[in-house]
Image: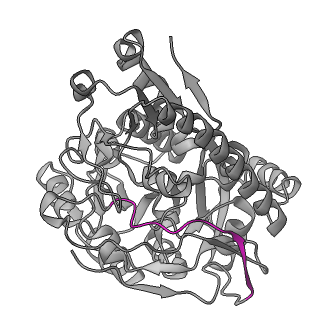
């Protein structure tokens, strides 16, 4: 395994100001998706900073400690189609975007960070030409074999120029969560601008800072997410680069996200009132002030104390405790809430994770069917956004006297 290479940014990704202030201190953790094989257990996994800084100029919230993207994404093992509900979500997504853009069949759709092509496939069903760009070589190859051509590389302005030369302008450029992943935001948006047709749109989904604060969704803080977006800084950033945010939708994905729609400033598309409405909401929430994030950390400390109280009580009674979920956000939760001493192993329904070991602590990851062989007393649902699905699937565990603990957005104990 390659040791992660880090560097420390000294200026804002959006406005390039050097005036940055620590806003949200977090505990360091290993790379969140680095679930290792048995053969890799002897290799030390280092922890890296996760604390977030606020730009005093444009109030963009960001991670300054940058891990080499090739380490993070080059051998990425997360596959979109393994997440419950995401394939159906992308079908609805494609339906809405095609209706909004009203572009003819055979128009070009380019997705940045296309993963296994789940969204591209939905656009292809609408008769669109599709092209993916993704640095995870194995996943890109699998997508191409499925008929969803995917270039195995990182998106840059140079790649955008070569794509336009070979395939023509795009009516739709999509980027989902990628907008949070990119260190060089200026190069990315210049590439998008170059690739778009005159009336084309750039559509992106990204976790929304408003939801993170309102719902205590801190597990979206991990090393892949170098940006934590909200509307006001994004609007200023896009305007500086010949683009304009013309519509925003709030959606439930990943605990609360936004789907943003941007156009070239020369486009005739109307700017919807929702853009200004959300900017006003952000002002009321004082998301441009460090004190707001200090209060958020205080809330997290309270949740951790509540959770620790429940787990200590179970441990004192000799109960076995396991974690349900083996994703990147789970790693953040395990380290921020210091759950290492409490867990015996982890459960996940994704075959890719089964048989591997969790980042840092090296808890074995096993299939959920094993619950009924090992009979743990308590399951912490670390994949808390899927708590209802997990509890429904494992009603038998409750019927047999088991206990579920849901840590977020507030601690909840579920038993018969």
In this orientation, which residue lies closer to the viewer: 137 or 160?
A: 137
Q: Where is residue 25 drawn, in percent x and y?
A: 66, 68
Residue 346 visible to an observer of this rendering? yes
Image location (x, y in percent) of residue 69: 36, 76
Q: Quadrant of residue 392?
A: top left
Task: Tell me if I can see residue 289 in this picture.
Answer: no
Seen at 54% across and 54% down, the residue is 220
The answer to which of 284 and 231 lies nearer the viewer is: 284
Q: Which residues are magenta?
A: 19-33
Which quadrant of the rendered structure holds the N terminus?
A: bottom left
Is residue 30 highlighted in magenta?
A: yes
Q: Is residue 251 above or below residue 237?
A: above
Residue placed most toward the observer, 374 or 183: 374
Instruction: Kindly give the residue lying farthest to the right in the view shown.
Output: 284
Q: Relative to 338, does residue 52 appear above or below in the rendering?
A: below
Q: Position of residue 379 (x, y in %)?
A: 42, 31
Snapshot quadrant of residue 87:
top left
């Amino acid at each position: 395994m390659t040791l992660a290479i880090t560097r420390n940014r000294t200026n804002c990704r959006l406005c390039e100001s050097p005036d940055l202030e620590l806003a949200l201190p977090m505990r360091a953790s290993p790379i969140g998706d680095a679930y290792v094989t048995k053969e890799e257990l002897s290799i030390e996994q280092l922890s890296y900073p996760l604390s977030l800084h606020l730009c005093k100029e444009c109030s963009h919230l960001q991670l300054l400690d940058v891990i080499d993207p090739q380490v993070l994404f080059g051998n990425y093992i997360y596959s979109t189609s393994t997440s419950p509900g995401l394939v159906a979500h992308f079908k609805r997504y494609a339906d809405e975007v095609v209706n909004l853009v009203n572009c003819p069949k055979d128009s070009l759709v380019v997705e940045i960070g296309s993963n296994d092509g789940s969204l591209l496939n939905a656009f292809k069903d609408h008769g669109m030409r599709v092209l993916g760009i993704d640095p995870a070589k194995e996943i890109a190859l699998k997508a191409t074999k499925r008929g969803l051509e995917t270039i195995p590389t990182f998106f840059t302005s140079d790649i955008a120029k070569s794509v336009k030369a070979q395939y023509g302008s795009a009516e739709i450029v999509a980027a989902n969560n990628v907008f949070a992943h990119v260190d060089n935001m200026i190069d990315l948006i210049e590439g998008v601008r170059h690739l778009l047709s005159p009336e084309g749109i750039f559509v992106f989904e990204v976790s929304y800072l408003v939801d993170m604060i309102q719902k205590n969704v801190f597990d979206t803080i991990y090393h892949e997410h170098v940006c934590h977006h909200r509307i006001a800084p994004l609007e200023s950033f896009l305007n500086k680069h010949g683009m304009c945010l013309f519509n925003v939708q709030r959606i439930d994905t990943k605990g609360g996200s936004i789907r943003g729609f941007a156009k070239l400033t020369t486009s005739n598309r109307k700017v919807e009132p929702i853009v200004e409405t959300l900017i006003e909401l952000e002002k009321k929430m004082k998301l441009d002030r460090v004190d707001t994030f200090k209060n958020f950390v205080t809330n997290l400390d309270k949740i951790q104390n509540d959770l620790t109280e429940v787990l200590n009580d179970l441990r004192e009674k000799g109960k076995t405790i396991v974690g349900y979920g083996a994703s990147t956000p789970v790693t953040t939760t395990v380290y921020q809430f210091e759950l290492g001493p409490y867990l015996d192993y982890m459960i996940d329904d994704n075959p890719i994770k089964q048989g591997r070991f969790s980042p840092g602590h090296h808890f074995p990851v096993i299939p959920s069917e094993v619950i009924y062989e090992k009979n743990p007393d308590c399951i912490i649902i670390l994949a808390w956004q899927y708590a209802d699905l997990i509890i429904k699937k494992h009603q038998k565990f409750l019927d047999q006297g088991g206990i579920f603990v849901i840590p977020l957005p507030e601690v909840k104990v579920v038993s018969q």
